[in-house]
């Protein structure tokens, strides 16, 4: 049986069309699942703008950052980076950002917001949420899918998939829309965990998804609580201060005043 070159060429063209249609359908389904959340470009613009403020404003080392958004079902909606290319950020922080977003969304509710920073002390040995970090492993098929050239692009392999994972240090915040409805989570990673929290707080504020109903921090919000003394947190929800780079304590303390959250 002889197969002509024309047949092979036509078959290849048909296959390309089918693949393109499949990608279009998949992208549409993802868009439907992420309706109401900031899109890729808005997230990238907000992250880049905040990171450009530098370590004097954000604390830490002044590094480039990754950010990720998940919807209320934990489906990744966008993954972005702030630098000129993906190599300008810590490679491991891409997944950490997505896991932070998942954690903040998964453990916050309609009337109560936990940041990942608020979970540090409860997740320690002897505390009420000890072993939390082993409760929900990251989805390996999403986390390490390829190609790497797509990481941080609109077609990042994590987009459209549930990422899972639990992180209990700063950088993850729940997202609440203008009506006070929880709609997902934001994760930022790539610097000290304190700087990640500051950047996430500012990005959420810039995007307008900080209508937080209630939280454990002073002022009834989900800010990082730096109250650990001699290994003990007075509030029970404390996070250690971060060493390296610009000290974070005063910057974090002033976040709710400079970038107010607004509840229901």
Image (cartoon, rainbow, N blue to C red):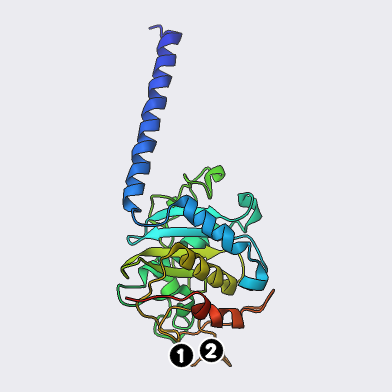
Q: CA distance from mark 1 to mark 2?
A: 7 Å
Q: Nearer the viewer, residue 246 or 41?
A: 41
Residue occupying the point 58% across, 93% down: 230
> What percent of the width, then of the height, locates residue 27?
38, 42
- For mark 2, give the secondary structure: loop
Which residue is situated farthest in the right direction here?
A: 245
Total marks in image: 2
Instruction: Tell me the residue that label 2 is attached to.
Output: 227
x, y percent for residue 13: 42, 20
Circle 2 crowding by C-alpha within 10 Å: few under 14, some 14–19, many from 20 = some
Q: Residue at x 34, y 67 (%)?
A: 178
| Residue at image point 37% right, 72% down | 107
* Location of residue 230 with respect to 194 vertically, above or below: below
- Tell me where residue 261 sits by quadrant: bottom left
Residue 119 rendering spot, x and y as whole percentages? 45, 78
- The residue that label 1 is drawn on is 235
């Amino acid at each position: 049986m002889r197969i002509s070159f024309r047949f092979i060429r036509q078959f290849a063209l048909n296959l390309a069309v089918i693949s393109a249609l499949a990608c279009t359908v998949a992208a549409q389904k993802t868009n439907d699942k992420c309706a109401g959340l900031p899109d890729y470009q808005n997230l990238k613009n907000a992250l880049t703008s905040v990171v450009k403020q530098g370590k004097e404003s954000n604390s830490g080392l002044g590094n480039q950052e990754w950010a990720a958004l998940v919807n209320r079902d934990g489906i990744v909606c966008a993954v972005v980076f702030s630098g000129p290319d993906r190599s300008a950020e810590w490679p491991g922080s891409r997944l950490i950002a997505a896991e932070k977003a998942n954690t903040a969304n998964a453990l916050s509710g309609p009337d109560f917001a936990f940041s990942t920073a608020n979970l540090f002390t409860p997740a320690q040995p002897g505390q009420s949420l000890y072993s939390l970090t082993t409760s929900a492993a990251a989805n390996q098929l999403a986390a390490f899918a390829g190609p790497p050239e797509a990481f941080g692009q609109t077609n990042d392999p994590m987009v459209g998939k549930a990422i899972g994972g639990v992180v209990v240090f700063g950088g993850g915040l729940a997202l609440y829309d203008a009506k006070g409805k929880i709609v997902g989570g934001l994760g930022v990673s790539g610097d000290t965990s304190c700087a990640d929290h500051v950047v996430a707080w500012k990005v959420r504020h810039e995007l307008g998804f900080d209508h937080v109903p209630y939280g454990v921090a002073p002022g009834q919000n989900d800010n990082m609580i730096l109250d650990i003394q001699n290994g003990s947190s007075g509030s029970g929800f404390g996070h250690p201060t971060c060493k390296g780079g610009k000290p974070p304590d005063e910057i974090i303390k002033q976040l709710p005043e400079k970038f107010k959250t607004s509840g229901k």
